[in-house]
Image (cartoon, helix red, strand yellow):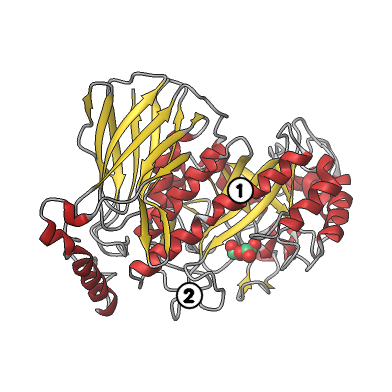
Amino acid sequence: MSIRTRPRASLSSRPLSIVISHLPICVALLTLALVLLPGAARAQAPTPTPAAAPFAAEVTIRADRAGSTIDRNIYGSFAEHLGRGIDEGIWVGEGSPIPNTRGIRNDVIAALRKLKLPVLRWPGGCFADEYHWRDGIGPRSKRPRRVNTSWGGIETNAFGLHEFMDLVELVGAEPYISVNVGSGTPQEMMDWLEYMTSDSDSALAQLRRKNGRQKPWKLKYVGVGNENWGCGGNMRPEYYADEYKRFVAFIKQYSEGKFEKIACGPGGHDLHWTEVLMAQATKQIDGLSLHYYTLPTNNWKKKGSAIRFAEPEWHATLMQTLRMTELLNKNSAILDRYDPDKRVALVVDEWGTWYDAEPGATALYQQNTLRDAVVAGINLNLFNQHSDRVRIAASAQSINVLQALMLTQGKELVLTPTYHVFELYKVHQEATSLPVELSAPRYALGKGSVPSLHASASRDAKGVLHLSIVNLDPNHPADITLTVAGAAPKRASGRTLTAPVMTALNDFGAAPAVTPAPLPPLQLQGDRFRVSLPSKSVTVLALE
Ligand code: AHR
């Protein structure tokens, strides 16, 4: 996406200038009231933000400059044994009154199927480097209870390998397994891969059959450790590169296909890690992982609240999430030097917002507002734009943990604003990425500014063009003139996700406050469409 910026037209030069010039104050007061009134954000205060004058923007989809295919795996997610992510979130057990298929929640299966979730990463996270796969096979009553030393609580191992593979088959997703490097051995990893994928009569393949799975499973993605610079073993990159090469030497092929071996990559901005890994192990690496979390404050000790925030935190969060741009560019530049043919994928297998836990909440449980939807839209746009290199991504995490797609409470399930962004964006899966040119003012607050619009586009197999476009500005709608270079679509329609207030969220026992709604039909004027996007919104248009 190329962005040309220009100063925002002075508000006082617009009609209704007296009312409009007081709008920032009105908005600030309204937001303050929502923050201060207990439960205001949860109650979805009905008072909408007063309509403000729109800003004008020009958007051009470059259908004449087709890029790479957007791998469907960019739309993946991550499920770790943590808090209520697996237990309660996915797994309720066969005897549960909550409708389930062999112990897995039916509502979760249906929601993930609707997303066309392509890939699911499991069992961690930090948990992966303390997980021993044999704990999670065989009769459930005999499985050991272990202390979850990463995240607290007891791991019952009721949800193990067979249950995870059942889940991905029910959902229609591919499994992505992270093997234990930090406290495991190459032998343990070899046994796991043989158990899963061998069709022979070896003892391990026979054990799998005895445990109920006749045919081997298909497994492609193998993550070799997780955050081995931190919770996965506190390693230096030179040491991990050696360990990685030792482990992958023992990744054998037991059936058709080929394992894609994914190395632990940098956390955030540690480019030295990427440099060393690529210098020492490019030949053995199929994918290099990258983790980046969006913290409103960029301070791990005081991250900020998921639900109580005002415009400064909204703006700061968007500034922080946009740092993903720089991470993708800088890591891609290193990969380009060692791998100019782009064989090695960048695998952004943990991304999302991370806020302070609410008192009494289970580990890493957080609510999810319209702000998270905007964060998701920006990150997915970035992955679409970098689809030549980013070929797998996994949002952290799927259910009840961090920037979740879904939240559960007993038998209730809530689809978060982030879920709806994934649902809107699924049209990009396997489509051809197209550049987007934007001319729009920047959205400034205090000393910082961010683009007011952020977009990506693609052309699907039927020739339909899809534009996903985020309006980061919480106060002003966007009046967009949309042109397409290299194609002449005649019709356009779209759906948008927005709400009256930036803290809007979907909660248990209440009507959903943030769900996509159709846009009024777009008008074609000559060779351009006119479209008005609400402030603080995520929109996907189809043009044909
Ligand atoms: O997603 C939560 C944790 O964040 C993961 O376990 C770890 O890999 C990362 O630090």
- Mark 1: give few (<14), some (14-19) or many (20+) Cα within 10 Å: some
Q: Amino acid at mark 2?
A: Ala
Instruction: Please tell me which residue is depicted at 77% across the width and 51% down the height of the picture.
Output: 275
Name the image quarter holding residue 541: top left
- Classify mark 2: residues with Cα within 10 Å, few (<14), some (14-19) or many (20+): some
Residue nearer the viewer, 317 or 202:
317
Nearer to the camera, 441 or 172: 441
Residue 92 seen in the current view: no
SS assignment at label 1: helix
Q: Which is more foreground, mark 2 or mark 1?
A: 1
Residue 365, image x, y percentages:
48, 69
Q: Observer-nearest residue: 353 or 331? A: 331
Element assignment for label 2: loop
Residue type at numbered disc 1: Leu
Asked if residue 400 is positioned above or below residue 289 in the image, the reply reads below
Q: Which residue is mark 2?
A: 357
Q: Residue at x 70, y 53 (%)?
A: 178
